[in-house]
Image (cartoon, grey):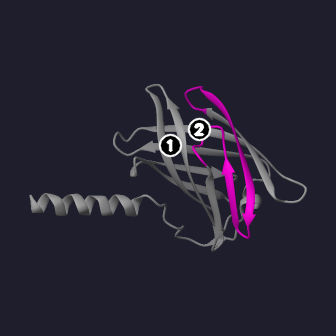
Amino acid sequence: MLTRRFLLLGALSLAACASTPPLPAGPTTPLTLDQAFVGRQTGRGVFRIFLTGSERRFTALLNGRLSRHGTRLTVVEDFIYDDGEENRLTWVFDRTGPGTWAGRREDTVGMATVVEENGSIRLAYTADFKSPSGVNRLGFADIIYRRADGLIVNDAVVSRSGFPVGSVRFEIGG
């Protein structure tokens, strides 16, 4: 019984460590939220489910604009999945201080938090994700950075009830 408890504690500890994406390994160029998302851009991504190993690929057309005073960033995301499904979501981020933002999208539960630090962006939020089997409440912990070659990368760990269940990699440009 004691051995099972230690194994469970060890597994929970590993799950907690895996719930935040790691910082990029190679050289990066400093990036802020508005630099990453202002203007029209196209990106490709993949959503992976750890348990089954299944993947869902998508293209996203992004159109971001910053308010005149630089305090509100609106990003319209048009998703086109490889299976033909299409979806539009719109982020609205408000600057809350130096290097910090709060945001909302149609599917978020509560507010997303954004912190710009060490040349990268951390984004954390909870969203109700619609799937053929129903609605799942998922947590997202993203790190967004610009590689030295200019490609913007968004890596995310996706969790359910606090346990990592999948990942997303989304690349803009290139």
Q: Left or right: where does residue 15 sit relative to residue 26?
A: left
Element on which disc 1 rests: strand
Find residue 23 and report its horizontal and vertical position in percent: 52, 68
The N terminus, quarter of image: bottom left
State the residue at coordinates (61%, 52%): 112
Question: Relative to the observer, which residue lies in front, 56 or 160?
Answer: 160
Type of the residue with mark 2: Phe
Q: Are marks 2 and 1 in contact (CB under 8 Å)?
A: yes
Q: Earlier in the sequence, mark 2 or mark 1?
A: 1
Among the 4 quarters of the image, the one containing residue 116: bottom right
Find residue 74 and report its horizontal and vertical position in percent: 77, 47
Q: Which residues are magenta?
A: 81-110
Type of the residue with mark 1: Phe
Which residue of the protein is positioned furthest toward the right in this rendering? Answer: 68
Label 2 Cα neighbours within 10 Å, binned few <14 / some 14-19 / many ≥20: some
Find residue 131 and report its horizontal and vertical position in percent: 49, 29
Find residue 152 and report its horizontal and vertical position in percent: 66, 58
